[in-house]
């Protein structure tokens, strides 16, 4: 076994010596995400850590993140930055799939209005187009929980760029 | 050893069987963050996972996140949502410390202008006040990397609420 | 005749001595607006000067401004600030009508994405609610010209306040 | 005298028959602005109507509008749309002067946080650069009254385009 693997196992053992139930829930969640990434379910570690999954259709997207202690802020509701992360994923993922081969998009502006918070189980962000231009895209997004409670709305501007090869 | 601990160790072993060097870097990072949280360095798991640390003075804040594969998007630069997360942390953390005991703040609006990206090592967000009202706060934030390259600027509105007991 | 009326008439005469056709179009427009205000069609001088008229239903609004040289910027398309003015009128007018007697609203945040410009004849802004809270309202607005060309979209946050008596 | 001039004079006479003191103040203001435009003080009618004047330096701008009934909303404070107009003028005017000959800028995003209102005499907007890119500019602006009371802050994104000839 490599040195780094040994180090990882020792680190885990040391954590488990004093771990709380919540610590263990988080460890299962994070490691489960990494395992999923190895199996091709996620392309990015951040998505893996958040168990973020998305469906992208031609004109709309739906991205989901389970609400667990991993994304809680200090009052045990989803962190505002994670709301921003799911919003950027729902809009940016749709935007990048909409441009011609050889092109990609970069976010230029993100504006989020936070409406309510939730103690429920899942964040669901739905993205769609306001404007599909040749050089710029404007998109909108609504974030709800699984009961349909509206948590935030957002708009984003994206700039179309040539993909680096 | 508890059942859950056993399950966590088995999951890690299974990951390490096929882990890439990057997987191992990420595992060390995530587990190191959880360990730090156990030792009181972080209060939230999301901060622990990101190794996000902050300094909060009376009128300004500085929050840092190391740039690692954990926060990379598919083109290996920091994910726009993580920029939003550090921005929200730098402004919201300063805002919540500025209100009277018994009160807290909630983000109502977050607006981010993305300027450039970076292949360097650290995200640094500096928050400050534009307006400190009795019921609302308006704040601004600049995100740079450790070379001083400006990555994003943001403004946020916060609403002062009574703290739930 | 009062001194001030005399002064106004002399000022107009002096303008008409060297007026261009466009000057005269603008004068007819501005004076026509003031006349309309005297007849109760407008409540504010700014609406009168812009010939801005609105319809407000329970859950939506529609506000219109004719596109004339009065609102042109230097490249003869509607000034971005006037787009913001019609947006604020469509959202704020709807918001203020939605609160209980004795209350009013103030705009706290306005975010506008400009999409296209127009050489057509009319700006039409349609406002609606994203969220109607007890203390805050979040609204959205789309601005088009009379052909349905989308010019801008916007969101606004409004704070509910007690009306000054 | 041309037919249109005759019509304008008759319209003014009809207004002055029933004009209030406030009507006359507004008429003097609007006509004074048109006169100033004839004398080259303003390039646009909207600036003339608002008596909006600006100073543009290399890296900053200062634009002023007197607070008169022309820009009052129904509670006799400056209309939110006029705040947006002065913001767009301060940032856009500076942006357009900063690009190379043959180029111009268009506003793509405007985000305004409204902080306070004023019963004082003048709106003053100061614009500056956050980022000067080759294709995009990001700017910020603070609006105060003449006593230094902060009324609003804003950021804007501008896209550099080739000037139409």
Image: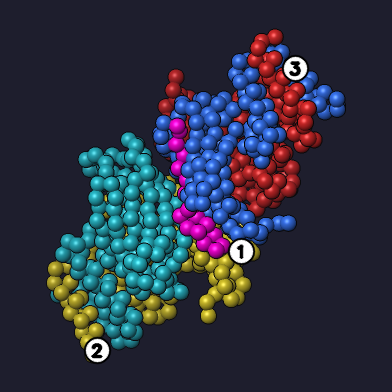
Chain colours: A red, B blue, C yellow, D cyan
Rendering coords of residue A41 (x, y %) = 67, 24
Q: Label 1 lies in what chain?
A: C
Q: Which residue is mark 3?
A: B13
Label 3 near label 1: C-beta < 8 Å?
no
Judge whether residue D99 can be spotted in this image: yes
Which class describes the residues within 10 Å of circle 3: few (<14), some (14-19), or many (20+)?
A: some
Label 3 near label 2: C-beta < 8 Å?
no
Q: Which residue is mark 1?
A: C135
Rendering coords of residue D11 (x, y %) = 28, 78
| Majority SS type along the magenta span | strand
Position of B143 relative to D47 (above/below): above
SS for dot 2:
loop
Q: Are marks 2 and 3 on the same chain?
A: no
In front: mark 2 or mark 1?
Answer: 1
Q: Nearer the viewer, residue C76 or B92?
A: B92
| Residue in the picture at 41% in, 69% down | D118
Q: Nearer the viewer, residue A88 or D118?
A: D118
Q: Determine which of the numbered discs, if any, sits on residue C2 in the image.
A: 2
Q: Label 2 lies in what chain?
A: C
Q: Nearer the viewer, residue C34 or C163?
A: C163
| Residue in the picture at 50% in, 55% down | B138
Distance between the alpha carbons at the discs numbered 2 and 3: 94 Å
Q: Determine which of the numbered discs, if any, sits on residue C93 in the image.
A: none
Rendering coords of residue A33 (x, y %) = 69, 27
SS for dot 1:
loop
* Quadrant housing the C terminus of chain B: bottom right
Q: Which residues are magenta?
A: B129-146
Which class describes the residues within 10 Å of circle 1: few (<14), some (14-19), or many (20+)?
A: few
Distance between the alpha carbons at the discs numbered 1 and 3: 52 Å
Position of D16 relative to D79 (above/below): below
Q: Is residue C125 left or right of residue D32?
A: right
């Amino acid at each position: 076994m490599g040195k780094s693997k040994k180090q990882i196992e020792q680190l885990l053992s040391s954590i488990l010596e004093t771990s709380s139930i919540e610590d263990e829930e988080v460890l299962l969640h994070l490691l489960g995400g990494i395992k999923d990434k190895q199996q091709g379910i996620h392309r990015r570690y951040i998505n893996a850590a958040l168990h973020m999954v998305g469906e992208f259709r031609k004109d709309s997207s739906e991205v989901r993140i389970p609400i667990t202690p991993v994304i809680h802020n200090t009052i045990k509701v989803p962190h505002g930055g994670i709301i921003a992360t799911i919003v950027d994923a729902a809009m940016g993922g749709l935007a990048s799939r909409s441009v011609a081969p050889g092109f990609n998009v970069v976010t230029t502006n993100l504006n989020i209005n936070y409406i309510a918070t939730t103690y429920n189980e899942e964040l669901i962000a739905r993205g769609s187009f306001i404007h599909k231009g040749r050089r710029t895209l404007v998109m909108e997004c609504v974030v709800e929980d699984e009961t349909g409670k509206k948590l935030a709305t957002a708009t984003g501007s994206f700039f179309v760029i040539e993909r680096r090869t």
